[in-house]
Amino acid sequence: MPPPTTAISEKAAEIMDAAERRIRTSGYQGFSFREIAADVGVKSSSVHHHFPTKPALAAAVARRYTDRFEAALDKAKSAEDWRAVFRKALVQHGQMCLCGVLGAESGDLPPEVSAEARRFFTRNVQALSRLYGSPSAASRQTALRIMATLEGAMMLARTLDDPKVFDEATRNLG
Amino acid sequence: MPPPTTAISEKAAEIMDAAERRIRTSGYQGFSFREIAADVGVKSSSVHHHFPTKPALAAAVARRYTDRFEAALDKAKSAEDWRAVFRKALVQHGQMCLCGVLGAESGDLPPEVSAEARRFFTRNVQALSRLYGSPSAASRQTALRIMATLEGAMMLARTLDDPKVFDEATRNLG
DNA sequence: ATCAGTCTATCTATCGATAGATAGAATACG
DNA sequence: CGTATTCTATCTATCGATAGATAGACTGAT
């Protein structure tokens, strides 16, 4: 038996990889089916075969990103652990948080895409606030502040093209 | 005499207003000369008359934004004052920080535009760090952290479509 | 008469999306 | 078994719309 029957084909996963890379670099408006197709070595019509529309592709990419992010945070016990996960996303790929990019242009995104960006932050703020005791205004405030600092630090580090900026901006988070 | 001879014409200013609004909503890739032209009631060729290229227009808008921002911060004496300026930009116009949007897509921006985004953050981090004593690693770290939190909070508030998120995320900044 | 500002008209390039064809693998049937 | 059918993935070709940009004519104020 081949690897346990996957929901999506290998080619579809390659397409999502390319789309994620492009979106995290240039934003939703900044990628095209033709570019993605060229990245994976097919024609744009083949990309449409796997993902009918641009919003559908972007939403699928965002959903997978959120899933992976939550998996990586599964064992996070402190703000420092969260910082490490964000740091890895920035340094390892040299790129912004996917949902941070989408959030920045959220004023003009197809509904299905902005919904995924919203979902990312809603769920992560909830998870983060659980580290700070029972649900309360105080724990939510702390979670929002930390999430804002992490996302802003990624954006600053990318804009100033210096990963050290992330480390400096996120010292003493908790 | 019309209002004291301005460097740029009134129409050029209108064009920059429209461009700023569009960029803050949709990002650099998300606005076009035709849209801007329609916004101010001219043809796209007239926009080209005032600003030869798209990068030139975006860079001019970013430069003006930085100038105005620094003017508004002229009398800022505390992190709380900074917070108020960012808050006004978010609530009054219901939009992201222009340079926050540009920063998010800074991986694929014309050089003259990403240079303006970089300039915004470089100058503001310097100014902010002056509030925290003589130049030092510590004052710079604090400035970077506060700037990251303010920008991230704007993005979160916009994505979650709730201005209160900004207030919660930026409580106890200093 | 000059000159800034606007217009019409047009160019080339690219966009997202669709149609129709084809090759090959998988599946179902007799 | 072998044959017929269906599915998957890709291709070529094309659609209408829109992108940024340019050339040249017109208008109106100084």
Image: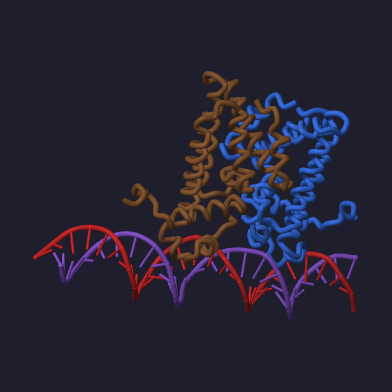
Chain colours: A brown, B blue, C red, D purple
Which residue corresponds to the image point at 86% horizontal and 56% vertical from the top-left? Answer: B7
Where in the figure is residue B14, as x and y percent of width and height? 74, 54
Q: Nearer the viewer, residue D19 or A151?
A: A151
Residue B164 seen anywhere in this rendered image of the structure: no
Left/right of residue C8 with respect to residue B51 in the rendered view: left
Which residue corresponds to the image point at 50% horizontal and 36% vertical from the top-left? Answer: A70
Which residue corresponds to the image point at 62% horizontal and 25% vertical from the top-left? Answer: A142
Left/right of residue A67 with respect to residue B71 in the rendered view: left
Q: Is residue B140 above or below residue B20?
A: above
Left/right of residue A151 with respect to residue B49 in the rendered view: left
Residue A17 seen anywhere in this rendered image of the structure: yes
Q: Is residue A32 above or below residue A100?
A: below
Where in the figure is residue B141, as x and y percent of width and height? 76, 33
Q: Quadrant of residue A47?
A: bottom left
Which residue corresponds to the image point at 52% horizontal and 18% vertical from the top-left? Answer: A134
Q: Quadrant of residue B171?
A: top right
Where in the figure is residue A21, as x and y percent of width and height? 57, 53
Left/right of residue B69 with respect to residue C17 in the rendered view: right
Q: Quadrant of residue B38?
A: bottom right
Where in the figure is residue B152, as x and y percent of width and height? 65, 37
Number of numbered markers: 0
Q: Nearer the viewer, residue A53 or A35?
A: A35
Quadrant, the C terminus of chain A = top right
